[in-house]
Image (cartoon, rainbow, N blue to C red):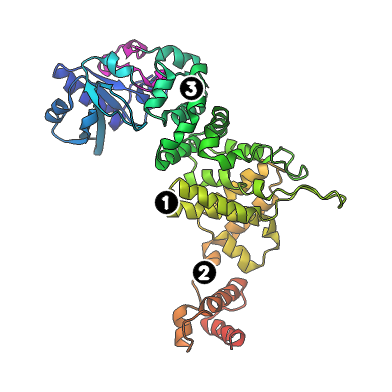
Amino acid sequence: MAKLASAKYKAAVRVARWLRDGDHAAYLAGGCVRDLLLGIEPHDFDVATSASPDIVLQTFVRTESVGAHFGVVLVMDEIDGERIATEVATFRNDGAYSDGRRPDAVRFSLEAREDVVRRDFTINGMLLDVLRWEAGDRLVDCVLDYVGGLSDLEAGIVRAIGEPPRRFDEDKLRMLRAIRFAARLGFSLEPRTMAAIRSHAAQINVVSAERVRDELTKILTEGAARRGFELLDQSGLLAQVLPEIQRLKGVEQPPQFHPEGDVWIHTLMLLEQLPKGASPTLAWGMLLHDVGKPATFSPPDPAKPGDRIRFNGHVEVGVAIARAILSRLRFSNDDCDQILALVQHHMQFGDIMKMKGSTLKRFLRLPHFEEHLALHRADVLSSNKNLELYDFAKRHLAEMGEEEIRPKLLVTGADLIAAGYVPGPKFKEMLRTAEDAQLEGEVATTEQGLQLVRERFA
């Protein structure tokens, strides 16, 4: 791989050189080494060193002690006008992990091998002598590999370092991370590692909801969502973190509308269409859009020839279930609102060609309507593949434009008050009536809108 020019890389090299000049070992560590070997430019560069946190703090002018107790210091730098924070971690040997997340105590070490063997997976356990690489040596020759990471990387295997049960006892979130790495990289899970995940799956519930949420969101948005959720299911983790999604399995759908199969298969097909870097709200909207179907499944009535499977009220039930999931995983209010809107409105496309003008405009001006379009397109391509309604919505959105969809209101609350109306329960209905008439083209001035209100709300 060619040398990198990013400011973050330059900052990490500078840190390593300063530490090395002080007679301390210093290497690039973790995921950045894995990505460099795969020919992927890393987003961040971490440095592992034999220097103690106190020495790191003394060596560099600008630092932040974000976890000195665990040997982690941020070294601040500015390169090419960009402010960079490089994470520098002292070699260490961890004690017990009584909370299933962090070690109760750490012992700093001078040995790189001792630091590596307490890390999570072999492909993340390699170190890179970046100064040798900078000097011109081949990348692979500059790698320190004490755990077989190079061979696992070449074979496409995610393997826990040492004994898998011990690694997952130390940090339960590593189980979800194993799934994420396998999905994103297209790797397989080493059998003993997968077996340990299955036996430890129920323990994922000791991890905070926020950490679980963030890991699931990464699985959804790193470009391999379908593979990730298939592995979650196979590992037993899906039943623990999202039992509502596992219940989609085996829920049949009317074949005339869903020839692809049950609700689980349909949902996986939507996830397969999520591109790398998709917005988290769209990803979760796709995952949850049919979450209400298992609870509303109604088989064909044998007394009614030609009757079919139905899911009456699945949208309303789905919104309630989705709200409970999002609350449990502690999503922000803004993200909740958008994800629930995607679930709530995904069936509305079926009526789009019959909507009156005002209803259509209100629909097209939903916040982040591009996500509603993307969900509908994926929904259709995962079932009957008829894009007629999608094309209709997209065409009208382009033809109408922002001013027609969101015109400046002719009648406001202030106009109603000035006309002698007292604010009260009817105010909202009056304003909506005037706006509907404006969107339909029935009124063109404030006075016409007020006259309409007078006629309907005498």
Q: Is residue 128 magenta?
A: yes
Query: Which residue of the protein is positioned furthest toward the front in this rendering?
Result: 98
Of the numbered discs 1 and 2, the one sitting upstream in the chain is 1
Q: Nearer the viewer, residue 446 or 274?
A: 274
Instruction: Calculate the distance from the C-alpha at mark 2 to the C-alpha at mark 3.
Output: 59 Å
Choose top left, top right, bottom left or bottom right for residue 333: bottom left
Residue type pointed to by label 1:
Ser
Q: Which residue is mark 1?
A: 332
Magenta stretch in the rendered image? 119-146
Check disc 1 and report its element: helix, strand or loop: loop
Residue for point 28% across, 32% down: 7
Q: Is residue 247 visible?
A: yes
Residue 196: mark in rendering: 3
Q: Which residue is mark 2?
A: 407
Residue for point 52% across, 17% down: 191
Residue for point 36% across, 19% down: 125
**Taking 337 as reference, is 115 left or right?**
left
Q: Nearer the viewer, residue 256 or 279?
A: 256
